[in-house]
Image (cartoon, coloured by chain):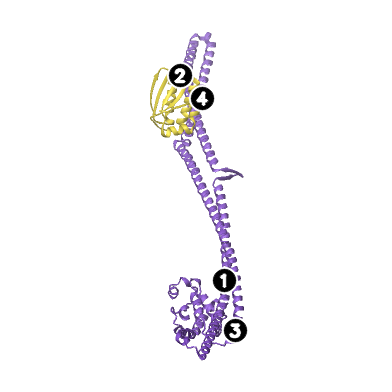
Amino acid sequence: MKLTTSHIGTTYNAVIADRLAFSDHKAFRELLFAVTESGAKTCVFDLSRLQSIDSSGLGMFMVAHEEGAANGWDLVLKGANGHVDALLKLGKFDKILTLQEA
Amino acid sequence: MFKRNLKIDFSPEEELEDNSASEVAELESSADRLGAHLLREWIDLSADQRVALKALIWEIDQACDLIDTNVEGVISSFQNISSRSQEQADQIRNLAVLSQEIEIDGEKRSVADLSSGLKDILAELIEKIVQLSSRGMSMVYKLNDINDELAHVDESIGQIERINSQTNLLALNAKIEAARAGEAGRGFAVVANEVRELAKTVDTLSTSLKGQISSISCGLQGAYQLVEEIATMDLSEQNLEINAGFSKMVDRLTSQNEQVADVLQHSATATQEISRDISMAVVSLQFHDRTKQIFQNVNVALGICADSMDALSSRSEDAAAEMDEETASAETFREQIVGGFTLNEMSRRFEAEFYPNAALVAGVHAIPAAEDDAAHLFNEAADAAADETDIDRDLDEVFETVTPPATVSQMAAPDNSTSDNDFADDDEIELF
C-alpha cells in the first residue's frame, strides 16, 4: 500500500494506491487513528490508483466504516475501477457506505 | 376394288344415253352389288367397333381400379406422414418446455429462476466473505491491542522486580543494623529476615508471572497467524475473481438456453405447418372419387353405344345375308385403333381382341392377359398378325389409300418392358 494523506477542512483525504492486502493492516490502523485524531467529519479514500485488493483489504474497509461510525466520521470510497470496483459491488458496499465515481 | 367399280359404273354418260333394256338391267344389278358391298363393309366395321368399344370399357375399368388402389395408398401414406409430423411437433414443443425447466425435489423451476437464484446465492456468499474478513481484521486489531497490553504488564512486572530488589536490599540493611544494635536489635533482625523471605516470594511470583505472560504472548502470536490465514488464504483475490467469472457463466448459460428454446419453438411451428400442408394435400387427392365417377358414367354411355350397335348390326346382318355379297374387311379401322395407342400393353390387348385366332394359337385370352406373359405373348400375336399384314398391303394397293397405316409389326415393336414408361421411351416415340 502506498499512502498519501491530506486534511482540508472537515474532510480527510487518503490516496490508497498500488495494492491493499493483509500485510498493510498496521499502516491501515494507524491511518484510522489519524483520521479520528484529525476530527474530520468525512474521510475519502481515493482508490483510483488502487490496482488490486484481497478479502482482507475489503475487511479493512468494513473496519474503517465501523471505526468511523464509532468516532463520528463517514467513510466515502471514491474512483474505484476494474477489479476493485467489481469486488466492491459484489460485496454490496454500496448498501452500507457511499461509493463515488472518479 | 369397289372404288374401281364405282368409277366404271357411274362415269360413262354416253352408255346411259343408250336406253336399251339390257343396259338398264345391267345397271340395276350393278347398283345392287354396290349396296350389298357397302352393307357388308359396314357390318365388318361395326363388329370391330363393338370389339373396340368393349375393350375400351374394360380399359377404363382397369384405369379406375389403378387409380383407386394407388390413390388410396398415397392418401394413407400422406395421412401417416401427417400424424407422424404432428407427433414430432408435440415432442419438439415438449423439448422446448423441458429445456426451460429443471425439477428439483419434485418442484419445477425455470432455468432463468435458477440462474438468478444462483446469482443471489453468490452475492450473499461474497457479502458473507467480506463480513467474515472484516471480523477477521477486527480480531487482528484486538489481538494487537492485547499484545500491547501484555507489553505493559511485562513492564509493570519489571517495575515490581525492581521494587522487590530494593525491598530485599532494605531488609539486608535492616538485618545489618539489627546486628549492630546487639541484644536490643534481635527482634528487629527477625522482622528483617521475614521481609527478605517475602521479597524472595515476590521474586518467585514475578518470575512465574513473566513466564505466563510470555506463553500468553506466544498463544496470541499463534492466534494472530491463524486469523491472518483466514483473512488471506481462503478469501483471496483469486477466489473472488473466480466467483465473479462463475456469475458471468451462469448468465451466458441462461441466454444460450433461451436461444435453444427459441429454435425448438420455431422448429415445432414449422413441423406443425408441414402437417397442415400434408392434410391439405390429402384433401386435394380426393379428386380420384370424382374421376372414377366420370369414368363409370362414360362406361355406361359406351355400353349403351355398344348395345345399340349390336342391335343394328344383327338387323344389317339379315339384310346382307339376302344380298350375299363378299366385301373387303375393315383392316384400316383396326390398324388405326391399335396404332393410335401410345401405351404398348394396350396395343397388345387390342390386337389380341381384333385377332383372337392369332392370340388363341399363342394361348392368350384377349383382354385379361397376365402381365408376365404379355411381352412374350405379344410377340407371338405379332408374328401371327404379320401374315395378315401382307393382305393389308394388297388391299392398300387396291384402295390407293393416301396415307398407308403403320403395319402391325411396325406399330407394336417388340419391347420387353411392360411398364407405363413405354411412352417415355425414345424408340417408341419414333415408331408412333
Viewer-nearest residue: B277 or B117? B277
Chain at numbered mark 3:
B
Q: Earlier in the sequence, mark 4 or mark 1?
A: 1
Give residue B60's mark.
Answer: 1
Mark 2 = which residue? A41
Q: Which chain is yellow?
A: A
The first of marks 3 and 1 along the sequence is 1
User: Which amino acid type is shown beneath numbered disc 3?
Assistant: Ala
The foreground one among A50 and B404 is B404
* Residue at image location 40% in from the left, 22% down from the top: A13
**Mark 1 or mark 2: which is in front?**
1
Q: Nearer the viewer, mark 4 or mark 3?
A: 3
Instruction: Find disc 4 in the rendering and name its residue.
Output: B208
Does residue B17 appear left or right of residue B300 in this picture? left
Q: Chain of mark 4?
A: B
CA gap, disc 3 and disc 1: 34 Å
Q: Quadrant of the N terminus of chain A?
A: top left
Amino acid type at mark 2: Lys
Mark 3 closeness class: few <14, some 14–19, many ≥20 residues within 10 Å: some
User: Given the image, what chain letter belongs to the residue carrying mark 1?
Assistant: B
Residue B39: x %, y % from top left: 55, 82
Give amino acid for label 1. Ile
Tell me the SS state at disc 4. helix
